[in-house]
Amino acid sequence: MKTSNIIIIGFLSLVIFYSFVSNPHITSSINILMTAVFLIYGVSRKEPNIIHISVILLTLNILEYIIYGTQIIDWSNGSFESNVVRGVLLYGVQLIIALTSFGLFIFRVSISRAISDSKKIRPLEQDSFITWSFLYLCIIYILALVESLSYNLLNSTLFSFIYSNYEPLVYIGWSLISASLITTAICHEKDLKKQVSDT
């Protein structure tokens, strides 16, 4: 099966699964768990590319979970002086995390080479999927921020598509990232089997 088919199947499966779960705390926990399993896989196979990808994602997932999932900041309506501040912080922090992720994955191979002197470090096909997925998430967060500002400053309900579909749209981005992780592991296993059969 081609890599693109694996990604599509994994992506669609995860979108459907996340949509049924429809609980940010559960989906965040699943993302953290899946990334941790991916990290364990990378360590067990001594594959630095997989290790570095999973460490970056795990760090960002845990950071986002701490900020949003543990209620360190009370995101409820009455906890901020205005809904404008609440919206800017809510979507702005997510945008900063996604932009950071986007930048880290653009330079992932350079960062990996700076951390490790392994000859195995190389760009993977899935690096671009993850990078583009974070760009997609950045766009969603920017549009959500714009909608929030237009609603809270102008009392405009003209733009409400992102607000009405925010969770499913974010789940699409995380499904792409998760599908890329699964595909990376599958492709790595295929490469290992091919190396064994060639020898």
Image (cartoon, rainbow, N blue to C red):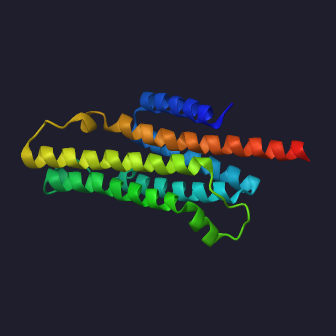
Q: Residue at x 47, y 27 (%)?
A: 16
Q: Hey, which residue is sitting farthest left in the picture?
A: 154
The answer to whether any part of residue 72 appears in the image is no
- Name the residue located 13 percent from the left edge and 43 percent from the top edge: 151
Which residue sits furthest right? 199
Residue 96 seen in the figure = yes
Determine the image quadrant of residue 9: top right
Image check: 117 left or right of 133? Answer: right
Task: Between residue 77 and residue 194, name the one nearer to us.
Answer: 194
Quarter the N terminus occupies: top right
Left or right of 141 in this view: 124? right
Looking at the image, residue 177 lies above or below residue 121: above
**Which quarter of the picture shows residue 102?**
bottom left
The residue lying at 61 percent from left, 72 percent from top is 114
Measured as percent of width and height from the top left, residue 37 is found at: 63, 47
Residue 15 at x, y = what percent?
Answer: 47, 32
- Give percent across and percent down for residue 115: 62, 71
Question: Residue 4: x and y, percent?
Answer: 60, 35
Q: Nearer the viewer, residue 131 or 152?
A: 131
Circle count: 0
What residue is drawn where x is 22% and y is 51%? 87
Q: Nearer the viewer, residue 115 or 63?
A: 115
Examine the rendered structure and indicate whether residue 21 appears above or below residue 110: above
